[in-house]
Image (spheres, helix red, strand yellow):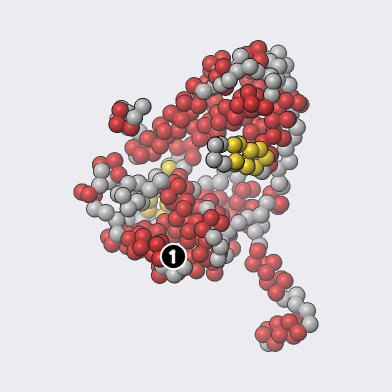
Amino acid sequence: MKEADKKQLHVHNKSDKPDNVVMKEQQIIEECEALEKQLPPWMRGYFSYLRGNLLPMSRRGYLQDIRFFCQYLIEETDLTEAKLPRDIKESEFRKVCAADVNLFLDYCRRYKKESEKAVYIYENANKSLARKRSSVSVLFKYLYRSGIVEKNITDGFDPIRLPKPGERQIKALQDDEVMRMLDAVTTGEGLTKHELAYWEKTKYRDKCILLYFLTYGLRLSELQQLNVSSFNFSRGEFLIYRKRGKESTMPLNQTTIRALKDYLELERASDDTLEEKHRDALFLSLQGKRMTERQIRELVKKYTSICLDTTRRNGYSPHKLRATAATSLIGRGNDIYDVQVLLDHDNVTTTQLYAAHKLNTKRDLIKSFEWGEDLEEFLDEKE
């Protein structure tokens, strides 16, 4: 269907959520429905189970995994004669045993896909493999309880070892790197000639985005969905929508107020020049539309790559600015339970991962452990 032929979607919103948040949820739901149409119709009970037990984004992830598993059965095994996932029969699915699933998980570690012009190599870490294992496990447990398959094969699935909390490397900016990043967005230093042309038009917006990530540890989706109407300056606060549809009120400080007012007063397009559906959007592209998550992600990678002295491709993601907020807050002596509430962690053990991140401590330790002439120089500096 051509873009011009698509029916326009209207929202009759009776909830407290802004229209853009409702529209975003609807978009994910429609993606889930499109995925369901690509899978066998006899799985519809499983689809209903996911709707009732998972959030839309998790539901979408599970459906993507099951579609990929079905595609694997078609392309890499002789368990089915189907050409498309939706054509796989119940009787063919009954042939799948635990060993087949384990081979699938091993295949997912690293595989390649070829197109006419290129060969793509895909590699999954254990965390991604565990999610795929969970998706397939939930499917087969449901099919067993429903009588579609005769045996519960999930006990035979190979375990996937996930890193223990203390083993995981937390990637976050150090304070000096944060200052270099903010200096880059303020002055344009480190940007290419091409990037400087855009920076002249977006520097206040870009700085505001970085500061809100750094100050509040917002998730990418939370920042992207912010509206002008989300802010109440008289109360010194703004409203965000978390996972599971939770509302959360965040306090403003002088830094974030100043950054936001500079952007609104000096740079953001006036409402009368915008399409109605974008008038309330806080962060706008140069085309006057709500910025996409991809645009925000690329913006963050650009400025973090400057402070890290690396390529744009190797810059940090918005989630690593969330980690930066966590490590900085804890490093300044704030209570770990307060930080948990600010970042909306379900469990305090997640927040404790950032408390255990002591890169500066290790640097100071090694710096004081010099040898020979370097030790003498270090001791002279200490005096």
Q: Residue at x 71, y 27 (%)?
A: 101
What quarter of the picture does the C terminus occupy? Answer: bottom right
The answer to whether residue 324 is visible is no
- Of residues 237 and 157, the one nearer the viewer is 157
Residue 26 x, y percent position in the rendering: 40, 31
Q: Residue at x 50, y 56 (%)?
A: 301
Residue 307 x, y percent position in the rendering: 52, 65
Mark 1 — residue? 192
Residue 88 x, y percent position in the rendering: 60, 17
Question: Vertically, is 224 above or below 157?
Answer: below
Question: Vertically, is 107 above or below 219?
Answer: above
* Residue type indicated by callout 1: Thr
- Of residues 112 and 140, the one nearer the viewer is 112
Residue 77 x, y percent position in the rendering: 69, 24
Q: Residues within 10 Å of mark 1 (few under 14, many from 20)?
A: few
Q: Is residue 121 left or right of residue 365?
A: left
- Of residues 322 and 74, the one nearer the viewer is 74
